[in-house]
Image (cartoon, rainbow, N blue to C red):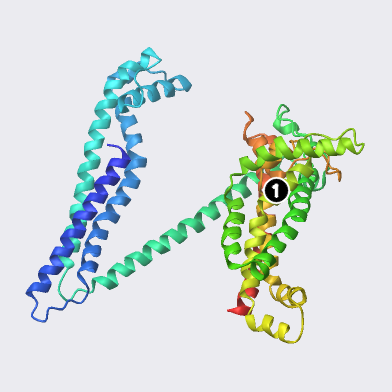
Amino acid sequence: MSVALLLLLALGLGLAGWLTGRARAWAFHKKSDSKRLASLPGYHAWYLALWVFIPVLAFIAIWSALSPYLITQSVLASPAADSLPEFGFQRETMLQEARAVASGNASGVFNPGAQGLVQPFEEAISFYGIIGILVTLLIAFVGGVYAFLKLKPDFRARTRVERIVMAILLLASLVAILTTFGIVASLVFETVRFFGMVDPVSFLTGTQWGPDPTTAPDAADPTRYGAIPLFWGTIFIGAIIAMIVAIPLGLMSAVYLTQYAAPTVRRWIKPALEILAGVPTVVYGYFAALTVAPFIRDIAQAVGISNASSESALAAGLVMGVMIIPFVSSMADDSIAAVPSSMRDGSLAMGATRSETIKKVLVPAALPGIVAGVMLAVSRAIGETMIVVMAASTAANLTGNPLEAMTTVTVQIVALLTGEGSFDHPATLAAFALGFVLFLVTLALNYIALRVVKRFREAYE
């Protein structure tokens, strides 16, 4: 039985438990002289349902990981598996083909030797499917009986349900935290392996980037792993060109929407502006590659720059800036709107014009929130990949000319990990070192942004 069907069975059992618990509570209510229970009938129902559903869900999670192994071992123990090769790719291919046919995911096998394994797979899948159903029903029955016997008129089901829900929320938080630690640990482990092959100083200060995956792993040339062009390309495109576009436009749009726009205009323009944040980055990439980059090249050639490329950092940065305008605008809008109206009214009462009030009162008062929005926008920009790939190429050039092709850290990470290279080669492990450095940079920017937001909230909440 598939995991989806087991989940449906768990939901059905949980619903049955909920109905049973509610009926039990109403029975207490009818028999009680005071007609009052320690908790509402709904909490009795949820208490029994959670005791049925949660243990069953935990079993399904374990069983979905364990049952494929048990099925494979059962097939390998059958006489039909005697014709399989001892080890290797062909053995795994035959097993996968037979499993796919037995599961109904394929109509036939390509390897004739796999045909004899189909029936053992069907028998094993059927056997362990029945085992899974029986154990699921047993666990649901035991959990349901335990919870059912606990239900009494004076039973405080609400307290127990809230404790279970709190435990679920805590578990969800721990999953997110542990996932983050796992990602960081994997990055650190692979980065340490890379720095065991390539000098960290050469990596962080070198100006030539050209990893060669064809060389021997122990004979890698450290001079080809200089990441300065990648870091410079990331800063130049994401933190300079994009911000030159995003900060003025985002800030001015926020000022207009909060101070000048009529309520009807604001209701239409603000959602339209925020739609930009929901556009897929590949759409921005198409726009940059097909429209903006050729336009910039034609303009440059018209003014006499003959070597202007159709792939340039300027095209990628401009479109990236347009993409992150909503990040700056939204944060600035909220920050300006959160400034107490007494400050604005006081400035106007003192004879200041509206523009003077904006420049000397509202914007300085909202500056922490505006800076936080800019920091978050920079973090978003330096992690962007698709626009750079489509509009700025993958050439690692250390140049200040925005009309030349450049690349960023994220683009090179994708290029290094999508090839056929071995994960024991420094050319592949370099992707983890780049990712670790990028992680530290974005972590620092997010920390600064959060500190600024905290200061902003402390001022006006």
Q: Which residue is mark 1?
A: 320
Among the 4 quarters of the image, the one containing residue 92:
top left
Extreme residue toward the top, this view: 112
Front residue (pair 166, 458): 458
User: How many numbered dots are placed on residues in this image?
Assistant: 1
Of residues 316 and 303, the one nearer the viewer is 303
Give above or below for 91 relative to 291: above
The percent position of residue 373, horizontal first and vertical second, equals: 66, 63
| Residue 319 x %, y % | 71, 46
Q: Nearer the viewer, residue 271 or 241?
A: 271
Is 404 on the left-hand or right-hand side of 26? right
Of the residues shown, which amino acid type is indicated by label 1?
A: Met
- Look at the image and tell me whether residue 238 can be seen: yes
**Relative horizontal placement of residue 450, taking residue 398 as reference (left or right):** left
Q: Residue at x 25, y 41 (%)?
A: 132
Residue lying at 37% horizontally and 41% vertically, measured from the top left: 65
Is residue 395 something one can see in this rendering?
no
Quadrant placement of the C terminus: bottom right
The image position of residue 68, as x and y in percent, is: 35, 35
SS label for mark 1: helix
Please give left or right for residue 57 compared with residue 441 in the image: left
Say few, some or many: other residues with alpha carbon within 10 Å of mark 1 (under 14 / 14 to 19 / 20 or more): many
Residue 217 falls in image quadrant: top right
How far across and down, in percent of the image, does residue 361 sit?
Answer: 73, 78
Q: Is residue 393 left or right of residue 63?
A: right
Residue under the image location 33 percent in, 25 percent down: 76
Q: Residue at x 27, y 54 (%)?
A: 53
Q: Is residue 294 above or below residue 189?
A: above
> Which image quarter holds the N terminus?
top left
